């Protein structure tokens, strides 16, 4: 057996060794065929991209023009007027005079008194708005209250009715002879009060009217915040023996903070600039222009005394005060940060 040469056994014709060289063209053709058979997504046309941009411009363009016409242009024009000597005599030929109008604003004898009155007006109103709003929201949130939907509708009515209607109605209620407020005072044995003839009582009347107008907004915001607080927290607090007062300060108040702080900021700005109530209840700052706040003082200066440049400067002072307050308040209270 040694030295015997083994010959290869020929394979049948149906079986052959695969040849990579022979199969390579076939594989390439198969890949090319599969590539041609698979439809490829055509790249987006440039015309389609431009049409999409024109569509967005058509949607945003009118809104941008309205914002420019209603907000941006009046603001820039007001800034320019605040540096001018514009009044009834120089209405068509006014000129820029630098910071003279701003100096005149702070040198005005009545400015600081009106500014202090505006701070008192804003502080008292916002405190009562928030206090009454949260108090009523907590009551309406209790499970034992029946007819919650009806109560919500009734309590939101003061905010839903236009301000000028409510202000004029309250002005009639403060009438010395026939007003409902004096009738109520007399029913308790008191004497009739001349509400609108004295600066202090007229200012109090305006504050009471604005409290009536403003608390429903805070109530709605607080009620929405209360509904987002998990009930399990109160159940756990009851198990631990926490009183209702303790539950409010440990659970309700902290979890309402992210909801109420932005609302307080917005309410402060609204109240600071609320000319409708003061003007309509006190009949334009009466008696003797003693019930003005800053925004009504601006209106008086511009359209009664025609001191347009001075009024524009005062309006920019109001803007600066509210801007600084908003930034400081939001940063100090971290009003934009969530508690959840």
Image (cartoon, rainbow, N blue to C red):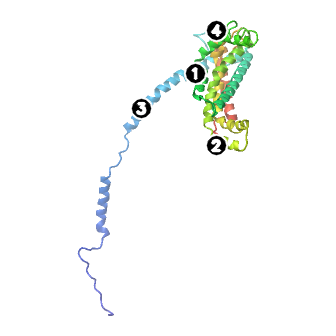
Badge 3 or badge 4: first in the primary sequence: 3
Q: CA distance from mark 1 to mark 4?
A: 31 Å
Query: Which quarter of the image is occupied by the N terminus?
Result: bottom left
| Residue 92 percent location from the top left of the image | 57, 10
Badge 2 or badge 3: first in the primary sequence: 3
> In which quarter of the view is residue 333 placed?
top right
The residue pinned by badge 1 equals 160
Q: CA distance from mark 1 to mark 3?
A: 37 Å
- Closest to the camera, between mark 4 and mark 2, is 2
The residue sitting at 39% across, 34% down in the picture is 51
Query: Does any portion of residue 85 appear in the rendered image?
Result: no
Q: Nearer the viewer, residue 121 or 131?
A: 131
Q: CA distance from mark 4 to mark 2?
A: 60 Å
| Residue 20 percent location from the top left of the image | 32, 69
Q: Residue furthest left?
A: 13
Q: Is residue 87 above or below residue 253?
A: above
Q: Is residue 120 above or below residue 252?
A: above
Q: Nearer the viewer, residue 310 or 9?
A: 9
Q: CA distance from mark 2 to mark 3?
A: 49 Å
Badge 4 or badge 2: first in the primary sequence: 2
The residue pinned by badge 2 equals 232
Q: Residue furthest top?
A: 177
Q: Is residue 145 left or right of residue 244?
A: left
The residue pinned by badge 3 equals 55
Query: Which quarter of the image is occupied by the C terminus?
Result: top right
**Are dots 2 and 3 in contact, CB under 8 Å?**
no
């Amino acid at each position: 057996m040694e030295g015997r040469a083994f010959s290869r056994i020929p394979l049948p014709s149906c079986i052959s060794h695969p040849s990579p060289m022979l199969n390579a063209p076939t594989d390439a053709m198969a890949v090319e065929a599969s590539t041609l058979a698979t439809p490829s997504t055509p790249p987006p046309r440039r015309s389609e991209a431009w049409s999409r941009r024109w569509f967005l411009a058509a949607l945003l363009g009118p809104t941008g023009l309205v914002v420019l016409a209603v907000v941006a242009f009046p603001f820039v024009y007001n800034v320019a007027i605040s540096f001018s000597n514009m009044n009834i005599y120089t209405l068509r030929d006014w000129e820029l005079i630098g910071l003279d109008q701003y100096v005149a604003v702070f040198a005005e004898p009545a400015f600081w008194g009106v500014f202090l009155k505006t701070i008192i007006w804003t502080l008292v109103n916002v405190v009562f708005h928030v206090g009454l709003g949260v108090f009523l929201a907590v009551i309406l949130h209790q499970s034992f209250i029946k007819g919650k939907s009806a109560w919500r509708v009734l309590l939101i009515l003061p905010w839903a009715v236009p301000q000028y209607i409510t202000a004029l109605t309250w002005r009639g209620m403060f009438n010395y002879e026939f007003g409902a407020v004096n009738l109520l005072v007399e029913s308790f044995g008191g004497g009739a009060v001349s509400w609108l003839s004295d600066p202090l009582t007229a200012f109090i009347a305006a504050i009471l009217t604005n409290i009536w107008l403003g608390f429903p907004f805070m109530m709605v915001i607080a009620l929405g915040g209360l509904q987002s607080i998990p009930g399990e927290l109160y159940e756990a607090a009851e198990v631990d023996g926490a009183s209702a007062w303790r539950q409010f300060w440990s659970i309700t108040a902290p979890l309402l903070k992210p909801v109420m702080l932005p609302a307080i900021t917005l309410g402060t700005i609204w109240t600071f600039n609320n000319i409708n109530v003061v003007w309509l209840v006190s009949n334009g700052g009466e008696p003797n222009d003693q019930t003005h706040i800053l925004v009504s003082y601006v209106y008086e200066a511009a359209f009664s005394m025609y001191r347009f440049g001075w009024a524009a400067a005062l309006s920019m002072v109001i803007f600066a005060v509210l801007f600084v307050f908003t930034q400081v308040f939001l940063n100090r209270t971290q009003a934009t940060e969530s508690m959840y």
